[in-house]
Image: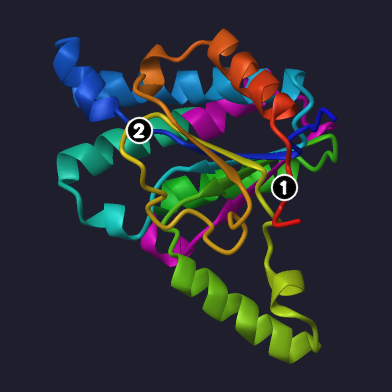
Amino acid sequence: MDSQPAHVGLIPDGLRRWAQANDATLDDAYLRGAEKVTEILLALQRNGVQTATVYNLSQANLSRTKAELDAVYAASLHFLTTLIPDHFDHTACRVRLHGNRNLLPHKYVAAAEDLETAMTGSDFQINILSAYDAQHELRTAHERALREGCDITDALEIGNVDLIIRSTPEQLLSGFLPLQSQYAQLVFLPTPLNDLTEQDIADLIAAYRRFPQLRGR
């Protein structure tokens, strides 16, 4: 029986590799990456996916060079202030930022919070992981579970993931939603993010639909 992925995780990767191969600057690579993530999100929405979670920055990533972080932040601001508002209906789409906001630049957090306020639809949800750390997420969920008297899985802000796509051949999740990903189908691609196409995404969704989702049963 065909199955539909309701929640897809995206781990964008290969941007530095793409910049070197195409004689491009990091700024250009990350800006193109922001546009490519937008294209992928639109492709996921068109293919019936209800939730997409994008790994923007882990807390470990914050130790990268200033030049690279500046490129990431510039592209992320373009994504938050222009690409998302221009391509997604605010009455149908919902955006949420997850991670330690205290570790992020003020402009980044302000732009994300503006989107959270403006985009409150229920048809398609975009989660953005930035300054994200799985241990921090689990500690926060544990505290909430104790406070509200619920199970820790109910205290998590992000639900289970069905399919995770990473644009690198390296088979690593890099701390991406470990509890929610326990039954996710994992796809690692040799193609860098900036060279992915909408057809690539449609093909991955179609392949998932043909794959039996037993989840331990």
User: Mark 1 or mark 2, which is nearer to you?
Assistant: 2
Tag of residue 117: 1
Could you tell me residue 146's position as x and y percent? Answer: 71, 90
Q: Pick the quarter of the image with the C terminus.
A: bottom right
Q: Which residue is drawn at 47% across and 19% down?
A: 36
Q: Name the residue under label 2.
A: 13
Please give left or right for residue 21 compared with residue 14 in the image: left
Q: Residue at x 33, y 26 (%)?
A: 30
Q: Which amino acid does label 1 sit on?
A: Thr
Q: Residue furthest front?
A: 217
**On screen, 135 above or below 107?**
below
**Are there few (<14), some (14-19), or many (20+) residues within 10 Å of tag 2?**
many
**Camera-side residue of 58 and 161:** 161
Could you tell me residue 86's position as x and y percent? Answer: 64, 19
Please give left or right for residue 192 compared with residue 87 in the image: left
User: What residue range appears in magenta?
Assistant: 79-104
Q: What residue type is labelled 2?
A: Asp
